[in-house]
Amino acid sequence: MKEIKEYALLNHVPIIRDQTLDALEKICKTHNPKSVLEIGTAIGYSGLKILSNCDCILTTIEKDLIRAEKAKSNFEKYNFINRVNLIQDDALNVLIRLVKNKEKFDLIFLDGPKGQYIKYYPYLKKLLNKNGILFADNVLLMGLVQSGEEIPHKKRSMIINMRKFLKILKEDIEFQTIIYDVEDGYSISKLTKK
């Protein structure tokens, strides 16, 4: 999968960072989730890593058509396409449908638009099985989420929304949440009550 990583770097496609990926792979190996939801497929790099580390069915959402097509090609190339449900659509639309259909997941990997995490939150919680895990990437946003400095205007709403997301996640007594200050930050939340 080295070539997928190289393609991402050359084409400025954001993919999961190495230490964060190690943590995600460990979760997959330890908990062996059977059903995984990924928000933000990009070109399929993290999805392939999830599929390689547990015996799951992966439902993955990507809004961008070109990236979704590239991801599909990568899933086919590595012979995982039969375990993938790739949905090319806006994540919020899909989350609403999944909740309506009473879908459930053992693991949710959240790596979509950062300013939208707060909007996704109530749906994500409904979609998790008891003892399911929500793994959210890029939650510290280059240190700006924790910084006391003035937020650049261009990033203000995204940072404010991420702060709200982390606050709600930490204060939700049904979740056990740990935030890791590694790379761009990630959180791991286990849904202990339901």
Image: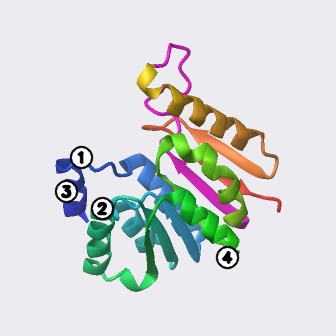
Q: Position of residue 187 (x, y in %)?
A: 58, 45
Q: Residues within 10 Å of mark 2 (few under 14, many from 20)?
A: some
Q: Residues within 10 Å of mark 4 (few under 14, many from 20)?
A: few
Judged from this view, the residue extending furthest toward the top is 149
Q: CA distance from mark 1 to mark 2?
A: 12 Å
Q: CA distance from mark 3 to mark 4?
A: 36 Å
- Between disc 4 and disc 1, the foreground one is 4
Q: Earlier in the sequence, mark 2 or mark 3?
A: 3
The answer to whether residue 62 is above or below residue 149 is below
Q: Earlier in the sequence, mark 4 or mark 1?
A: 1
Q: Earlier in the sequence, mark 1 or mark 2?
A: 1
Mark 1 residue element? loop
The label on residue 137 is: none
Q: CA distance from mark 4 to mark 1?
A: 35 Å
Residue stretch rendered in magenta on the structure:
129-151
Kindly identify the residue that appears in the image at 70 percent across and 74 percent down. 102
Q: Is residue 68 visible?
A: yes
Q: Quadrant of the C terminus?
A: bottom right
For disc 2, the marked residue is 67
Q: Magenta span: helix, strand or loop, mainly? A: loop
Q: Residues within 10 Å of mark 1 (few under 14, many from 20)?
A: few
Pointer 1 with pointer 2, Cβ within 8 A: no
Pointer 2 with pointer 3, Cβ within 8 A: no
Kindly identify the residue that appears in the image at 70 percent across and 43 percent down. 169
Kindly identify the amino acid type of the residue bearing the numbered disc 1. His
Pointer 4 with pointer 2, Cβ within 8 A: no
Q: Residues within 10 Å of mark 3 (few under 14, many from 20)?
A: few
